[in-house]
Amino acid sequence: MVSKYAMSVWNTVASGDAEFIDLSIGLEPDASEPFPPEIEYWDHETGAELLASNLNELGYEDIEGSDFPDGMGLAWEELTLIPHAGTHLDAPWHYGPEVDGEPSRTIDEIPLEWCAGNAVVLDFTWKEPRTEISAEELEAQLEELDHELSEGEIVLIETGADELWGTEEYTLEFPGMGAEGTKYLVEQGVKVIGTDAYGFDKPFAEMGRRYAESGDDAELWPAHFAGREVEYCQIESMANLDELPRRTDVPLVTFPISIERASAGWVRPVAILEGEE
């Protein structure tokens, strides 16, 4: 049975009036993240030589790159990267081997139903970098929107940190979620939480500083490790949340690439809105 949500989104797309808003950061070499992708580019001339070599290996030894139309073959690329580069969705397996005593799901096991639904955007652009977003602050933002979360909604945390993409500050200057805030959202029926910051928790350096000072291991990736108690996925390194024309009832699709037994998959979240918005 097709849900009312799916019918509404499909009707918007089919009518030709849909506005698509890309909420992702692409894969870029030399990007401002600790583990950027390495991308080797082959142009059309090189592609012809490589394709000719492939045909030579199949026994057609007389074929050369110059035999292709205009001496050009196919352009392509070779990428070396982790699934946590660029905009990506983390699976429960990323946080730990179990969730509340049950085996954690890997990215290829995530129900697609989790990854499509109406999104709610919570504004934390006012929040100081390197601080932790609390459950009380999340609740206050929802009250300000006069919105009560429902099962299957997707929550997006807007920090404005995507504006720092391309700078050294991108991985250093943003607020992060805390354990209690994460659990609060999941307990409302939320399965996917996104952020436009590099990480879901506070910046790496801030967590390290706090742990070094206190010796308290609760300072290390607390929001991630909340996923050992409650089952959810998170989207990191989103972008353009400020371009969304409204804060609630934002139709969103954010399907991850399926990688066997992996902790995450690259994703391109897209909001689908009526053209007149």
Image (spheres, rainbow, N blue to C red):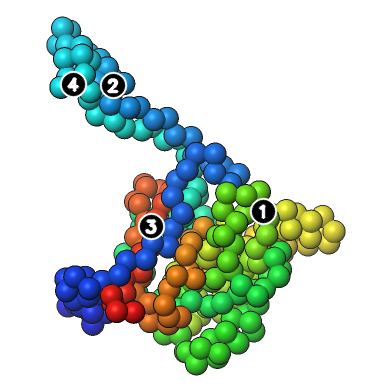
- Say which element carries label 3: loop
Snapshot quadrant of residue 253: bottom left
Q: Where is residue 207 in the image (x, y as percent from the top left)?
A: 72, 58
Q: Mark 2 points at which residue?
A: 45
Q: Mark 3 points at which residue?
A: 268
Q: Which amino acid does label 2 sit on?
A: Glu
- Say which element carries label 4: helix
Q: Which of marks 4 and 3 is in front?
A: 4
Q: How far apart are marks 4 and 3 (CA)?
A: 35 Å
Residue at image x 50%, y 92%?
146
Residue 212 horizontal side relative to residue 89, left or right: right
Q: What residue type is labelled 3?
A: Arg
Q: Work out whether mark 4 precedes mark 2 in sequence or the reverse, and give the earlier one.
A: 2
Q: Which amino acid does label 1 sit on?
A: Glu
Q: How far apart are marks 1 and 3 (CA)?
A: 23 Å
- Say which element carries label 2: helix
